[in-house]
Image (cartoon, coloured by chain):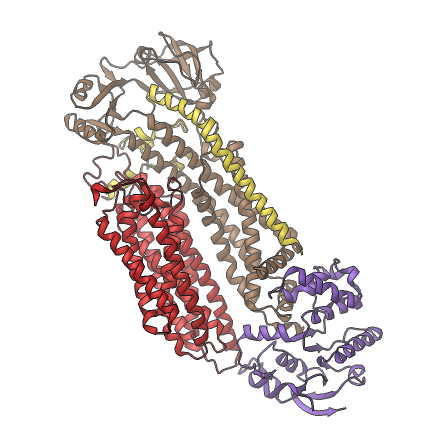
Chain colours: A purple, B red, C brown, D yellow
């Protein structure tokens, strides 16, 4: 059995606690993410997928419970340490591409490196290699807003991978894509899996959770884990 | 009151910084009261984020304190013409002795803010916010000094009355007999020199022992010696170093050495002195932090650097201040 | 180091992206700095010039006051003053003011005696005989006269008197001589109708500068209605006057600075949705709060440093190459005769330091809290939009 | 990724320009300034001048160093100003301060 890379125990996320608009987004979720596997969080919108994803991706801290990433409890970590783990361990693919539209492709992809100690030359080389890999090297000096949807998606993925992350987290990656692009994406994600990376995807798109590269599916409803099925 | 651009700049800056720190300390109090590391509530997260703002505010304030120290000395020097008998900044300061307090509060806030920033540095290194309470209690000590500085500064400048022509008889009888003393009297040269080099030697000795051993006592000794050395060095500058730099046997001014006529020698001199004393103070001050498990290694690592920097800075200071004594043109035979 | 450069790089991207807005900010900021710096440069160089040239002024001037007003000095005071040891040449001066109804301006008329050596700043000659005069540039301009023309003034009897313009002060000496008319001493006495044996005041030369105060004291004792004014007092007064003057104008123009800071505050707090989402993105891809704060710091630094340097350069050129044209009307007031400012560029780094303090600190202070508010954006927010 | 170099370059240029202006001005002070200053000092010395001829509208602005205390109304240095220059020239501080003492 593969090693569990991330596990949570009773992870709870409550927004606006003790206020009239209190909302329990995540209710005592305990899950395990195993190394090298593709895990899908499945469920309708509002089921707590995104909250769980952001907690295991060290984007936010749970209100209660434990979250252990690579053997380290991150539930109580100050934000700057969370940031440190996030930028060294994770690559994120968002529902929206979340690119800075007025800035060049090259800079968008390089941005995760800016607060780190990597030199300009090295960044440039890695960015070029990455863009080349996705076939958009020729457009590296264009502003993102000049690119087509498919190209923007590739930029977003290139950015997620630029720091060579162990774990890739994707939040509804196909929500804004047409069929052809979605197939493209699945192909790319499958490629990552072969490289041995761990992938966590939150989605309600059957095209993803029914495709055969998925190892485990975790179904969620109302902030709780409903069922875990392994292929 | 003298409506002088430099005075306006100083007062404006001091008011702004005091307000910034007031805001910071209000938030500090809030943090002290509500801090609960075990809680994961949104409120706690907001407090954690606030610490980031407070440390930014204090870094800016620290930068301001350093710059305003220079601006203060310059300004005081620039207005000395307005006072009968004032030959340099000392004359302006004597014209309203509160001016000297301003100097002390500025030096005080420099050291306090530096210590705060060092505390903050350690706090941010550890994953469990070990120093939060200490940091904000200490902040509440720093802020009054900054306000005291603002108060003294305002009182000093408001209390300055330039001696200008009066209608009846010129300025000369307006303030009869109270012409400002232009210079400071220095301590006797030769004993002062001895004390200066003795303390320098003691400081280096303590520094070397700190680097060689782990004994706490040497670290406390180093800090104490650094503190004493600060006063010894100030006295030495007034007593004889300035004389050798000016090559005048009677000019005891600690400020003129900042000027172009003396090749700005005062800048490296004071910079090395302040840094040397500051880094020398740190090891002793931060000894208690070693009791915290999450910081012990961090403090040990920083300590070695501090001791080394302190010794380096004070060595440079000693060389700079000895240079004119050994190689200058002034001979002080008659003045020993 | 490299990390800071990269954050600077992105700060510049951010600035370039909103180029019109930031350009406008830089223009306004530079202009404010230029005005403040111009005031300081102008008053500092006037102050330095005054201190330098007035160092040649008479060591001591003895005036007489009576009933609290200036009164003509009896010439026999000269004898009394002469009794003090260490006193050099003592000269009674004859001078006064003249209101010229024709041009609506005030002149200063000063009498000279004896043969004066040729002076570099005089075109033509100094008055060598009765009926000759030397005029300042301002007088010449107001009356449209030059060397060789005639200057008609109305004397104390109400009669027009003609003086031949023997010489004219060059424009370079404006700051001292603009409204000056130099006549022979006898001519001044007759023109104003001075009573016999009275002068306007007395200048005293003193050999040992450290004795000035003592001698002034003794004169005051011997002649209780005398008002001795020492050269040091004059210089000190000018220093205070120009400090006051620049301080006053700084106070007035700091209104511009304040409104600029409000602008900066507004710009920093009124983050557009786009900017907010950008900060969210940066945080999501691994930027920490402190990195965003640094980004904002660099943005502020780029804007304030650029504006500061541009403003300084503009102020320098404005004051020393264009004669402070923007400020001149403010300083000019109602003076009919006003010297052109051909200033000698006395500047020092202290001025620059003060300007930096006055302009950059309020800007930084007005942006720090808004920057922080922007920086604490939740990284998670980008997943919830 | 060259923007920071461009910025540093521009800032360097501005600093250099400022430095050139400062050096030029120092040079001007040394040469032309010194000469002018000498001839102005000569004027002051020979004619016995005491004040700058900047504002000619009132005696206390024309000759601040000679102004007196008691001149009634319009000439009293701290009187309500009707000349704009008066708002810029200090009322002799001694006038104000003497009263306090």
Say which quarter of the image contains residue B207. Answer: bottom left
Judge left or right: residue C111 versus residue C313: left
The image shows residue B97 at horizontal and vertical percentages of: 26, 50
Residue C98: horizontal and vertical position, in percent? 37, 19
Q: Camera-side residue: B268 or B191?
A: B191
The quadrant of the picture occupied by the C terminus of chain B is top left
Task: Find residue A119 and report its image quarter.
Answer: bottom right
Residue drawn 24% across the image and 44% down it:
D100
Vertical order, D35 against B82 (above or below): above
Residue B123 located left or right of residue B333: right
Please tell me in which quadrant of the rendered image residue B102 appears.
bottom left
Residue situated in front as seen by the camera: C323 or A217 = A217
Camera sees residue C162: yes
Numbered disc total: 0
Vertical order, C320 against D36 (above or below): below
Q: Examine the rendered structure and indicate whether residue B308 appears above or below residue C29.
A: below
Frontmost residue, B23 versus B309 = B309
**Could you tell me residue C170's position as x and y percent?**
46, 19
Camera sees residue C277:
no
Q: Residue B312: image x %, image y %?
A: 40, 58
| The N terminus of chain B sits in image quarter | top left
Q: Is residue C267 above or below residue C100?
A: below
């Amino acid at each position: 059995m593969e090693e569990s890379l991330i596990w949570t125990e009773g992870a709870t996320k409550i927004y606006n606690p003790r206020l009239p608009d209190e909302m329990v987004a995540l209710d005592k979720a305990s899950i395990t993410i195993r190394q090298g596997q593709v895990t899908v969080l499945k469920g309708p919108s509002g089921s707590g997928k995104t909250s769980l994803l952001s907690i295991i991706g060290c984007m936010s801290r749970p209100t209660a419970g434990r979250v252990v990433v690579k053997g380290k409890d991150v539930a109580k970590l100050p934000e700057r340490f969370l940031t440190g783990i996030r930028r060294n361990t994770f690559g994120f693919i968002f529902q929206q591409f979340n690119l800075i539209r007025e800035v060049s492709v090259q800079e968008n992809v390089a941005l995760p490196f800016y607060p780190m100690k990597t030199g300009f030359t090295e960044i440039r080389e890695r960015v070029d290699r990455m863009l080349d890999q996705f076939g958009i090297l020729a457009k590296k000096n264009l502003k993102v807003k000049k690119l087509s949807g498919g190209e923007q998606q590739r930029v977003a993925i290139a950015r997620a991978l630029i720091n060579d992350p162990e774990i890739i987290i994707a939040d509804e990656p196909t929500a804004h894509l047409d069929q052809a692009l979605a197939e493209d994406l699945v192909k790319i994600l499958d490629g990552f899996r072969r490289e041995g990376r761990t992938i966590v995807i939150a989605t309600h798109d059957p095209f993803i959770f029914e495709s055969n590269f998925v190892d485990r599916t975790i179904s969620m409803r109302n902030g709780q884990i409903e069922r875990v099925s392994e292929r | 009151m003298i409506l002088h651009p430099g005075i306006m700049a100083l007062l404006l800056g001091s008011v702004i910084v005091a307000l910034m720190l007031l805001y910071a300390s209000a938030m500090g109090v809030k943090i002290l009261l509500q801090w609960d590391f075990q809680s994961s509530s949104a409120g706690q997260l907001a407090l954690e984020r606030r610490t980031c703002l407070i440390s930014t505010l204090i870094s800016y304030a620290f930068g301001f304190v350093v710059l305003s120290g220079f601006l203060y000395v310059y300004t005081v020097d620039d207005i000395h013409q307005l006072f009968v008998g004032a030959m340099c900044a000392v004359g302006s300061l004597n014209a309203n002795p509160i001016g000297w307090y301003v100097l002390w509060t500025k030096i005080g806030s420099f050291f306090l803010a530096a210590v705060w920033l060092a505390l903050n540095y350690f706090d941010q290194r550890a994953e469990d916010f070990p120093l939060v309470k200490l940091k904000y209690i200490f902040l509440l000590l720093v802020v009054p000094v900054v306000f005291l500085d603002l108060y003294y500064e305002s009182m000093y400048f408001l209390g300055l009355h330039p001696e200008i022509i009066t209608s009846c008889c010129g300025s000369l009888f307006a303030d009869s007999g109270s012409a400002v003393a232009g210079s400071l009297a220095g301590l006797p040269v030769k004993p002062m020199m001895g004390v200066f080099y003795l303390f320098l030697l003691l400081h280096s000795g303590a520094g070397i022992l700190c680097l060689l051993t782990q004994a706490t006592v040497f670290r406390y000794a180093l800090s104490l010696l650094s503190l004493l050395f600060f006063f010894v060095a100030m006295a030495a500058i007034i007593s004889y170093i300035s004389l050798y730099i000016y090559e005048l046997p009677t000019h005891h001014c600690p400020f003129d050495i900042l000027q172009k006529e003396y090749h700005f020698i005062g800048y490296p001199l004071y910079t090395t002195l302040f840094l040397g004393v500051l880094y020398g103070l740190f090891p002793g001050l931060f000894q208690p932090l070693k009791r915290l498990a999450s910081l012990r290694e961090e403090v040990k690592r920083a300590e070695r650097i501090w001791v080394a920097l302190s010794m380096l800075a004070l060595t440079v200071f000693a060389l700079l201040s000895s240079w004119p004594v050994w190689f200058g043109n002034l001979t002080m035979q008659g003045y020993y | 180091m490299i990390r800071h450069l990269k954050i600077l790089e992105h700060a510049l991207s951010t600035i370039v992206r909103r180029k019109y807005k930031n350009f406008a900010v830089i223009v306004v900021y530079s202009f404010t700095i230029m005005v403040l710096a111009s005031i300081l440069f102008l008053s500092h160089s006037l102050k330095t010039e005054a201190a330098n040239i007035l160092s040649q002024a008479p060591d001591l001037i003895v005036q007489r006051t009576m009933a609290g007003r200036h009164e003509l000095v009896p010439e026999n005071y000269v004898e009394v003053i002469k009794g003090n040891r260490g006193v050099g040449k003592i000269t009674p001066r004859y001078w006064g003011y003249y209101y010229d109804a024709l041009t609506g301006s005030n002149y200063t008329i000063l009498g000279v005696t004896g043969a004066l050596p040729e002076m570099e700043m005089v075109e033509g000659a100094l008055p060598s005989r009765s009926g000759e005069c030397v005029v300042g540039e301002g007088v010449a301009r107001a009356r449209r006269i030059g060397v060789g023309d005639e200057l008609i003034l109305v004397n104390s009897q109400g009669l027009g008197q003609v003086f031949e313009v023997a010489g004219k002060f060059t424009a370079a000496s404006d700051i001292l001589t603009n409204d000056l008319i130099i006549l022979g001493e006898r001519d001044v006495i007759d023109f104003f109708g001075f009573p016999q044996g009275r002068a306007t005041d007395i200048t005293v030369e003193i050999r040992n500068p450290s004795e000035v105060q003592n001698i002034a004291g003794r004169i005051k004792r011997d002649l209780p209605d005398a008002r001795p004014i020492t050269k040091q007092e004059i210089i000190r007064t000018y220093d205070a006057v120009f400090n006051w003057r620049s301080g006053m104008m700084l106070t007035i123009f700091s209104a511009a600075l304040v409104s600029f800071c409000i602008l900066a505050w507004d710009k920093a707090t009124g983050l557009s949705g786009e900017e907010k989402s950008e900060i969210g993105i940066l945080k999501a891809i691994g930027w920490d709060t402190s990195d965003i704060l640094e980004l904002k710091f660099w943005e502020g630094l780029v804007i304030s440093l650029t504006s500061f340097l541009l403003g300084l350069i503009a102020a320098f050129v404005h004051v020393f190459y264009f004669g402070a044209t923007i400020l001149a009307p403010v300083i000019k007031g109602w003076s009919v005769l006003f010297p052109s400012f051909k200033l000698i560029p006395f500047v020092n780094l202290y001025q620059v330091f003060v300007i930096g303090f006055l302009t950059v600190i309020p800007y930084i202070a007005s942006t720090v809290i808004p920057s922080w508010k922007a920086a604490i954006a939740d990284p998670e927010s980008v997943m919830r939009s | 990724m060259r923007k920071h170099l461009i910025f540093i370059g521009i800032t360097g240029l501005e600093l250099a320009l400022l430095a050139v202006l400062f050096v030029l001005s120092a040079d001007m002070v040394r040469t032309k300034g010194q000469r002018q200053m000498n001839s102005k000092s000569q004027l002051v010395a020979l004619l016995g001048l005491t004040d700058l001829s900047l504002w000619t509208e009132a005696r206390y602005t024309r000759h601040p160093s000679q102004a007196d205390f008691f001149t009634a109304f319009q000439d009293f240095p701290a009187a309500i100003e009707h000349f704009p220059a008066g708002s810029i020239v200090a009322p002799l501080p001694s006038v104000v301060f003497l009263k306090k003492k």
